[in-house]
Image (cartoon, coloured by chain):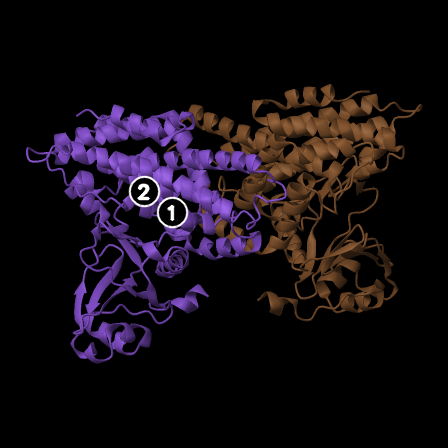
Chain colours: A purple, B brown
Amino acid sequence: MAAEALHGFRPLDEASLVAYIKATPALASRLGGGGLDSLEINEVGDGNLNFVYIVKSSSGAAIVVKQGLPYVRLVGDSWPMSRERAYFEASTLREHGRLCPEHTPEVYHFDRAMSLMGMRYIESPHIILRKGLIAGVEYPLLADHMSDYMAKTLFFTSLLYNNTTDHKNGVAQYCANVEMSRLTEQVVFSDPYRVSKFNRWTSPYLDKDAEAVRQDDELKLEVAELKSMFMERAQALIHGDLHTASIMVTPDSTQVIDPEFGFYGPMGYDVGAFLGNLILAYYSQNGHADQANDRKAYKKWILKAIEESWNLFQKKFVHLWNKHKESGEAYLPDIYNSSHLLSLAQKKYMTNLFHDSLGFGSAKMIRRIVGIAHVEDLESIKDASKRAECERAALNCAKMLLKGRRQIETIEQVIEHIQSFDRE
Amino acid sequence: MAAEALHGFRPLDEASLVAYIKATPALASRLGGGGLDSLEINEVGDGNLNFVYIVKSSSGAAIVVKQGLPYVRLVGDSWPMSRERAYFEASTLREHGRLCPEHTPEVYHFDRAMSLMGMRYIESPHIILRKGLIAGVEYPLLADHMSDYMAKTLFFTSLLYNNTTDHKNGVAQYCANVEMSRLTEQVVFSDPYRVSKFNRWTSPYLDKDAEAVRQDDELKLEVAELKSMFMERAQALIHGDLHTASIMVTPDSTQVIDPEFGFYGPMGYDVGAFLGNLILAYYSQNGHADQANDRKAYKKWILKAIEESWNLFQKKFVHLWNKHKESGEAYLPDIYNSSHLLSLAQKKYMTNLFHDSLGFGSAKMIRRIVGIAHVEDLESIKDASKRAECERAALNCAKMLLKGRRQIETIEQVIEHIQSFDRE
């Protein structure tokens, strides 16, 4: 099937894209009938994974067209990568969009042979959340929106809501997105803990820190368990790459994009990705502070966003569970048959999910400091010595959270730990 | 595909079976060329799930032909059940046979449309292990053989040996055996903990015990975690029903049959099934003791078999891991790069697997006492009061092991617990 589905691929350029749109009613209709002859096209992809075109008609309507390439380009190396990831991205967007349309852009069209998706253009003034965090912009609804997105997409694609037959159907389908999972296994769970040509860090400042990560047996034992959980546990249809550059925001709107790593995996991987990237944003602030803005108030806001994101997520997730407790085949209502017992079960479930989230979130922080792909929050700090100081604090915090997560009970304790590693 | 594959099904009787064999070289050749006109056919299935024919030719050659029926008959009720389980049984047998041919009967032929498998006839004096345990027969090689079977089939189908791509291929394929998994979810992890028309127990003796199981919040919270692990965790291609009636034995030979519940699940489910059923056999002995044989020596032998099965399994599993440490994508050799660190990782892995095995094994003991399907070891004790006493001891032991498993470090401690609940 894969071979068949991939037959007929040709990369589009601006000219052939116009012809494609004209021949595709699901896209043409979004751009209005008349203005198709004067489309304005901008390629905005970073060229690493995909072509991303913003297409605007003379009437002012706009769509995004995204086409997958058969490789990933990383630090100069080209990494062959199935274009089928575009299929899983479109499938995950559609499924998450069904469950949480408020925070998921609509998919208008998907062409599997062409690895081509037409979707909502997330209009200005939306920007990538990571850029907003670097600029020091507060997003008062971010925690509310993201907790909503995570609670809905994770709860409704888990066995707390679905029966086993539907769940295993989904699991089987997304098993085929394995190339993306393997990429994660390598860059998140493996490379930072061994010598790899892909690794980099702020050298020479962090040379010893990077080496210490590779020699930390306790850390490596914990990471092994997280990696196995990532590989084996089909808990929910997760986004798979939920960092702050996969989120577009205005003060009023939050849109989650780019779920091409989507598969049935552990919920904590998504929750941890989001929280971990907020913690990285926190530690980068000292590097962005200047005389005009010491960023102290902003750091407090980030900590509040972390705290609220988890607390609201937990509250909303349990609320969905209570509301739909007759659904799903994991916790049957005639077994968990008192509100006391159900609440004990929920507490246990959420505690495990909290620890998983801290583990995965920390692993994702570590890999952004000593692994292949770094974050702009820290990379944009030009003074290498200052950057290294921010990175070291983040790294030490992450190591502590990863190893000690089972002893942590509340997000407020996490906040205290974050602050304790911050040497302003 | 499923619909297509199932087209053309017709249940065979003795006459049509002969015609089928003659038309199928893979079967006919096993029976010798000449003797096909005087085949001796005996139907030996218990009629619950399948027709099972033993077919013998005049030359003395023999095969087994097994055909799946589209339902399971249980306590008078008929439970619709996809015949596709026959496909997964044949697939699991073939895969386990490739990995451990010594203890897996050969599959000669499989016809998916007919849900029909031709396989090795496991000749006399092989008997079902459970019957041997009831008769008080010692099998000096049982622990050695079963530890071999479990170590090889579980290790070689896990991410300790395979890469993620192959593993997820397998996971996806076996997701379709979901009807069998759902049956397990219901009868092992759900029904014993709620009022269900399918449950039964030795009444009135165990009425209060069965009720206590349904009202034991701590137990139900633990069972929820085991059930989730069973549903979500694709650790290895497990047999899925590895009790003592799925094993045929002589003092020299051990053959594992009937893996129609096969799927990618937690390893501990197989190990626990085997150990848990040995523990049930142990507790049934007081009911089989008589003046001629007090069964005390036999009980000691069962305990030794339990101890050796785990200890040998652990040793062989770790041996395979060491031997193949360059394979698999879970624990990469350049990360777990000293024998000290690898050994720590193995210890952690085996401790988790031990606790999983105790959890699943206990859950399987409980369901055999207060759930739908009981074991002949106990059922064959005619005196209901005596049987109830054996069952209560087994039930109390299982509850303790299930709830306290994380505090248990060695199989020797398990043996002590087993003895402590045994009131001779």
Q: Quadrant of residue A336?
A: top right
Type of the residue with mark 2: Phe
- Which structural element holds mark 2? helix
Residue found at x 88% / y 64%: B38
Q: Calculate the distance from the C-alpha at mark 1 to the C-alpha at mark 2.
A: 10 Å
Q: List the single residue furthest toward the front.
A: A339
Q: Residues within 10 Å of mark 2 (few under 14, many from 20)?
A: many
Please tell me if label 1 and label 2 are on a single chain. Answer: yes
Residue A64 appears at what percent x and percent y? Answer: 25, 64
In the rendered view, does A174 fall on the left or right side of A376? right
The tag on residue A98 is: none
Picture coordinates of residue A283 (x, y %)?
Answer: 22, 33
The residue positioned farthest toward the left in the image shown: A291
Crowding around mark 1 (Cα neighbors within 10 Å: few <14, some 14 to 19, many 20+) is: many
Please state which amino acid type lies under the numbered disc 1. Answer: Met
Residues at discs 1 and 2 in contact (Cβ within 8 Å): yes
Can residue B326 be seen?
no
The chain identifier of the residue carrying mark 2 reads: A
Residue matched to label 1: A150
> Closer to the observer: label 1 or label 2?
1
- Which corner quadrant holds the C terminus of chain A? top left
Say which label, 1 or 2, has the lower sequence index: 1
Residue at horizontal 32 percent and vertical 77 percent from the top? A25
Would you say A167 lies left or right of B364 here? left
Foreground pick, A157 / B164: A157
Q: Is residue B16 visible?
A: yes
For the point 27% across and 68% down, the residue is A11
- Residue matched to label 2: A274
Q: Out of B324 and A325, give the one closest to the viewer.
A: A325
Q: Secondary structure at mark 1?
A: helix
Q: In percent of the image, x 76 and y 63: which residue is there?
A: B28
